[in-house]
Amino acid sequence: MTGIDGCLAEAMTVPGARGASLVDWSSGLALGAAGHGPDSDHETAAAGAAELARLAFENGAFTGATPDSGPVEDLVVTARGSYHLMRFVETSFDSSVFLYLWLDRTEANLAVALFRLKDLTARLVLP
């Protein structure tokens, strides 16, 4: 099990990682950050990612389209030079937190990054 700082430090070891933050999508606030944020601003990036996460999480088209559908697990946004990955954190309480990872597209492996995010969020312990 790892805390927020440990989780973010490990996220920064993902190949191609430029920045990572733990974001509360209900408020848009970064609960912690490491590395660089897009445009050197973790708070603005967290607010923008939170808006996207909130839209996806609350949209019935993504959650419950079939009886086997569950909540959204990951969001992947691709841009010319980067990947933006968001992994929702499962908790025993009603959580509105996700791990956001910004990757350099030329150095990153998307499959590896998604696998690592899944592992990191599974081991994350929130206070």
Image: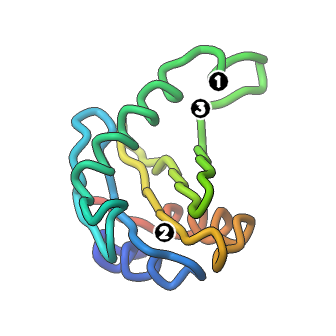
Mark 2 is surrounded, within 10 Å at the Cα level, by few (under 14), some (14 to 19) or many (20 or more) other residues, namely: some
The residue under the point 44% across, 80% down is 12
The residue under the point 26% across, 59% down is 42
Labels 2, 3: front one:
3
Mark 1 is surrounded, within 10 Å at the Cα level, by few (under 14), some (14 to 19) or many (20 or more) other residues, namely: some
Labels 2, 1: front one:
1
Q: Quote the CA–CA distance across marks 2 and 3.
A: 19 Å
Q: At which x and y percent is residue 73?
A: 60, 43
Q: Coloured how? A: rainbow
The residue under the point 60% across, 82% down is 15
Residue behind mark 3: 71
Q: Nearer the viewer, residue 13 or 94?
A: 13
Residue behind mark 2: 123
Q: Pointer 2 and pointer 3: residues touching (CB < 8 Å)?
A: no
- Closer to the chain start, of discs 2 and 1, is 1
Q: What residue type is disc 1 on?
A: Phe
- Closer to the chain start, of discs 1 and 3, is 1
Q: What residue type is disc 3 on?
A: Pro
Mark 3 is surrounded, within 10 Å at the Cα level, by few (under 14), some (14 to 19) or many (20 or more) other residues, namely: some
Q: Quote the CA–CA distance across marks 1 and 3.
A: 8 Å
- Closer to the chain start, of discs 2 and 3, is 3
Q: At which x and y percent is residue 52?
A: 45, 34
